[in-house]
Image (cartoon, rainbow, N blue to C red):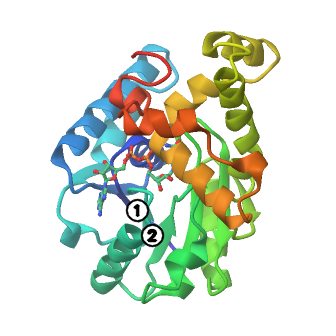
Amino acid sequence: MDIKTICVCGAGTMGAGIAQLAAQQGFKIILFDVNPVMLAKAKADIENNLEAQVNKTRITDEARLSTLKNLGFIDQVNACIANVCIEAIVENIEAKVCLINQLAAINNTDTIFATNTSSLSIDSIAEKTVCAERVLGMHFFNPAYIMKLVEVVEGSKTHKQVSNAIMTLASQLGKTPVLCKDFPGFIVNRVARHYYLEAMKLVEEGIADIETIDEIMEASGFKMGPFRLMDLIGMDINLSASNAVYQALGKPERLQPAALQKQMVEAGKLGRKTKQGFYNY
Ligand SMILES: NC(=O)c1ccc[n+]([C@@H]2O[C@H](COP(=O)([O-])OP(=O)(O)OC[C@H]3O[C@@H](n4cnc5c(N)ncnc54)[C@H](O)[C@@H]3O)[C@@H](O)[C@H]2O)c1
């Protein structure tokens, strides 16, 4: 399949990063969000990121300009016509299904619909769409334009040609794609649950504070401590992943979401995106 145009749906933390990455690799990008404020923020963030890359001589000014030319910012779903649509909207099955069905109605019959969900099973989304054989997971990590790993997840109805095309696309984007089984949390988010949950238990039990835990984990070789990482990911997204893995595995006590996690979400302290999380930004 010749992929030239990619529509990225959702211009939040992940969508903006994926759009920047793919535009830098020469793809024509439509970045779609229902919220014009998020689109404006994504545009400003991408422009700043590219300028920073020029200043660090990582890319030329020509590359910056051609990346910007590859990007279109839209708030109308009717303009989302592409070879591949990657959705990175709110972590909610109904919202994702509704969007994919809207996109399927206006796109060609060979357009692929990839979901960037971190915690929902692909089948739980795909089975409610009109195009299950063209739906699969394409799970990027944050920041998408830096992190190398992409988990590619086939649902039970995903056509092999579709997953092959997305494995190839991920490689063309300079990523390391790994084919994963369809299970909430896939591989990384399941393994990483303990990194977050045990760290929050240490705080809840008064054994150590967040700064100390982050410092210790970073000194022991992790790139980011658990609290700095949760702030980067977003507490709402992290809580959704905790809930999904906990439910799917039959509610084992070791994976019970932390009270601290819920408190942070209820207080609207979602991390970097709200400028307040475990740290202030
Ligand atoms: N944050 C992470 O570290 C991370 C990592 C991997 C995957 N994910 C997944 O990526 C997805 C997005 O996460 P995020 O952190 O970027 O969220 P976010 O809250 O930063 O952004 C979501 C964006 O989607 C937009 N939106 C909501 N409904 C929409 C719709 N129907 N159509 C178009 N736009 C819509 C919102 O306006 C918002 O701008 C989620 O499924 C999440 O699980 C997140």
- Say which of marks 2 and 1 sits in front: 2
- Inter-mark Cα distance, 2 to 1: 22 Å
Q: Position of residue 110 (x, y in %)?
A: 46, 85
**Pointer 2 residue:** 93
Q: Is residue 215 above or below residue 275?
A: above
**First-in-chain label (2 vs 1):** 1
Q: Is residue 166 visible?
A: yes
Q: Quadrant of the C terminus?
A: top left
Q: Is residue 224 above or below residue 183?
A: above
The residue at 25%/52% (across/down) is: 72
Q: Position of residue 158 (x, y in %)?
A: 62, 82
Residue that protrudes farthest toward the right in the picture? 220
**Pointer 1 residue:** 6
Give the crowd class for mark 1: few <14, some 14-19, many >=20 residues within 10 Å: many
The residue at 20%/50% (across/down) is: 35
Residue 17 as seen in the image, left or right of residue 197: left
Q: Amino acid at mark 1?
A: Ile
Q: Position of residue 245 (x, y in %)?
A: 67, 57
Give the crowd class for mark 2: few <14, some 14-19, many >=20 residues within 10 Å: some
Q: In what element is the residue under mark 1?
A: strand
The residue at 50%/68% (across/down) is: 114
